[in-house]
Image (cartoon, helix red, strand yellow):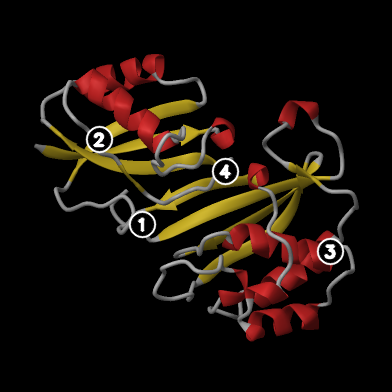
């Protein structure tokens, strides 16, 4: 047996997230079933993280163990023909036996897309808002977030994580075409964190929340104090980093 990393991307619209759930369509289950059929052996896949229902990933890694010796280029080609068109396989490559797609990741980057316009060719990949936000003010607020490491106020309640400490290294809004895109990078993220951070920053951008008010929200460490969690459709996992890739 050998361990392999698989590099992929997916449009999450049709799936109930990455992680396998009973009687529900997920990316993990779809990938495992297809790999098992193609390699003619049971394959269990471990992803670099868990995306929620409707969330997309343009850069995603997973690992699996399989009998060594198969032609990787052929498997990639056949997988892309067998999988649904909303999942794309970029590469499969061998790694050390103890390499782990989730625990070895040193940083992840997410992007959230919003627009105040109706974009028919972007349906399911952005969230429409009904105001024009002040992007400069939101970037000032985003820099305030960089001063903190406890993001309890933006974490989904009643999860089993041991700590709500995250070390942000980038948080910025940019205007890209007809959209505003929020990019955030950290060593780790809490469940729903990016969506709730985005909703809170948009409250700043529409004049509903001040910068000082944002500070108070973070320091209260209370999820009920923060803004709404934005819809899943605007969220993309765009980069996962490893020390050996």
Q: Quadrant of residue 219?
A: bottom right
Q: Where does label 4 land, which residue? A: 55
Q: Position of residue 7 (x, y in %)?
A: 37, 36
Q: Is residue 22 above or below residue 226?
A: above
Q: Residues within 10 Å of mark 2 (few under 14, many from 20)?
A: few
**Nearest the eye: 95 or 121:** 121
Element at label 3: helix
Residue at point 33%, 42% (across, down)? 62
The quadrant of the rendering that contains the N terminus is top left
Q: Position of residue 123 (x, y in %)?
A: 73, 31
Are discs 2 and 4 less than 8 Å apart at CB? Answer: no
Residue receiving disc 2: 93
Q: Position of residue 145 (x, y in %)?
A: 64, 74
Q: Is residue 1 left or right of residue 189?
A: left
Placement of 188 over or under 121, stated as above or below? below
Q: Which residue is mark 1?
A: 105
Mark found first going from the N terminus, 1 or 3: 1
Confirm or deny contact between disc 1 and disc 3 (CB under 8 A): no
**At numbered mark 2, what does the secondary structure look like: helix, strand or loop?**
strand
Q: Earlier in the sequence, mark 1 or mark 2?
A: 2
Q: Image height check: is 58 above or below 193? A: above
Q: Which badge, 2 or 4, comes first in the chain's sequence?
A: 4
The numbered mark, 1 or 4, whose residue comes first in the sequence reads: 4
Q: Which residue is mark 3?
A: 205
Quick one: label 2 or label 3, which is nearer the N terminus?
2
Question: From mark 2 to mark 4, how far is it between C-alphas?
Answer: 25 Å
The CA distance from mark 1 to mark 4 is 19 Å
Q: Residue at x 68, y 74 (%)?
A: 224
Tag 3: Cα neighbours inside 10 Å, few (<14), some, or many (≥20)? many
Crowding at mark 1 (Cα within 10 Å: few <14, some 14-19, many 20+): many
């Amino acid at each position: 047996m050998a361990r392999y990393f698989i590099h992929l991307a997916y449009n999450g619209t049709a799936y109930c997230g990455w992680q396998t759930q009973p009687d529900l369509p997920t990316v993990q289950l779809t990938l495992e079933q297809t790999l098992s059929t193609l390699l003619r052996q049971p394959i269990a896949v471990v992803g670099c993280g868990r995306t929620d229902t409707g969330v997309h990933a343009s850069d995603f890694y997973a690992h699996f163990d399989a009998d060594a010796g198969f032609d990787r280029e052929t498997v990639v080609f056949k997988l892309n023909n067998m999988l649904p068109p909303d999942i794309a396989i970029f590469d499969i490559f061998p790694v050390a036996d103890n390499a782990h797609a989730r625990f070895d990741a040193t940083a992840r980057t997410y992007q959230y897309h919003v627009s105040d316009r109706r974009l028919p060719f972007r349906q399911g990949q952005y969230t429409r808002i009904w105001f024009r936000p002040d992007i400069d003010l939101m970037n000032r607020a985003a820099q305030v977030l960089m001063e903190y490491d406890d993001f309890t106020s933006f974490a989904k309640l009643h999860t089993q994580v041991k700590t709500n400490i995250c070390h942000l290294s980038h948080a910025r809004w940019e205007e890209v075409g007809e959209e505003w895109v929020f990019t955030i990078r950290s060593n780790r993220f809490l469940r729903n964190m990016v969506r709730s951070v985005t909703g809170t920053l948009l409250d700043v951008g529409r004049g509903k929340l001040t910068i000082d008010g944002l500070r108070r929200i973070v320091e209260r460490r209370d999820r009920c104090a923060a803004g709404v969690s934005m819809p899943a459709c605007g969220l993309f996992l765009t980069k996962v980093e490893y020390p050996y890739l």
